[in-house]
Image (cartoon, grey):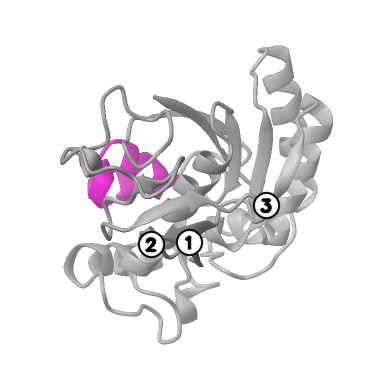
Amino acid sequence: MRTVYIIRHGQTLLNKQDKIRSWLNIPLDEQGFSEARKLGWELNRQGVQIDGLFSSDLLRSEQTTIEVAKMAGFQILGTTIGLRPWNVGSLSGTDGPTAHKVMMEHARNDPDKVIGGDGESFNIFKYRVLTCVIGLLNSHPGKVLGLVSHSRGERIIHAWAAGGSCESLGIDLDVFGERGEATASASRVEIKCSLVVGGDDGPSTANNDQEQPPMAGARKSALDGQWYVNDQSRPGKYLRVRRGQGRAAA
């Protein structure tokens, strides 16, 4: 079982106005900076042990990461587009409750359809975030990571942890549809999944056939049946391994 802390960024003007942020690259407001510093102080006071922080590459998430790290003494490991929220296209900047209804209709009834004209489908969003989380955890075995993300980002991770079908990236849509955690808050999530190194108490379901790996350290993906090893030069990335053919970039 792997422990991960999901941290939501601090308040922005659009949070205060209850409007959808999505991929709009907006900064924290004054209260957001204060919230982030307070969260870092509180995590330090509670003695929470986090080995390093990754954040989405959007400004509000990066700013939150910096403030939390300064107050708590955590190491910042990097940023990634994988932890961005759902790109909802033209719904960005619109009324939050109204947009949320549209988003949930897409998630439940048409998950492969692009939302908001030039956004991304729910399934693409889900796959992007969850495979990013898997990659980051597998690149840092034995480490407790803090992932600084967004409202729908933290919801999709919680929904995955509660979904009961981890290997197929199954989620609990009711959990996903819940209102996100408060701004600048942290929640602890336990991930038990054979796709994650150290995330399962038993053998990987992808290896039940006892097939021998083509090289030491290779793991068979339950998603596509291929063998992969961690790419040490690119955290969160993998190299596909073919028998007798060395490695291929993935």
Q: Is residue 17 magenta?
A: no
Instruction: Kindly report the distance in space between the C-alpha atoms of the residues bearing marks 3 and 1.
Output: 38 Å
**What is the three-letter code of the residue carrying label 2?**
Arg
* Closer to us: 99 or 208: 208
Which residue is under mark 3? 61
Instruction: Kindly report the distance in space between the C-alpha atoms of the residues bearing marks 2 and 1.
Output: 6 Å
- At horizontal 26% and vertical 64% (from top left) the residue drawn is 107
Q: Are marks 2 and 1 in contact (CB under 8 Å)?
A: yes
- At horizontal 21% and vertical 73% (from top left) the residue drawn is 110
Earlier-in-chain disc, 3 versus 1 = 3
In the image, the segment drawn in magenta is 152-177
**Mark 1 crowd level (few <14, some 14–19, many ≥20, 10 Å Cα):** few
Which numbered circle lies on residue 242?
2
**What is the three-letter code of the residue carrying label 3?**
Ser
Which residue is under mark 1? 246
- At horizontal 72% and vertical 43% (from top left) the residue drawn is 77
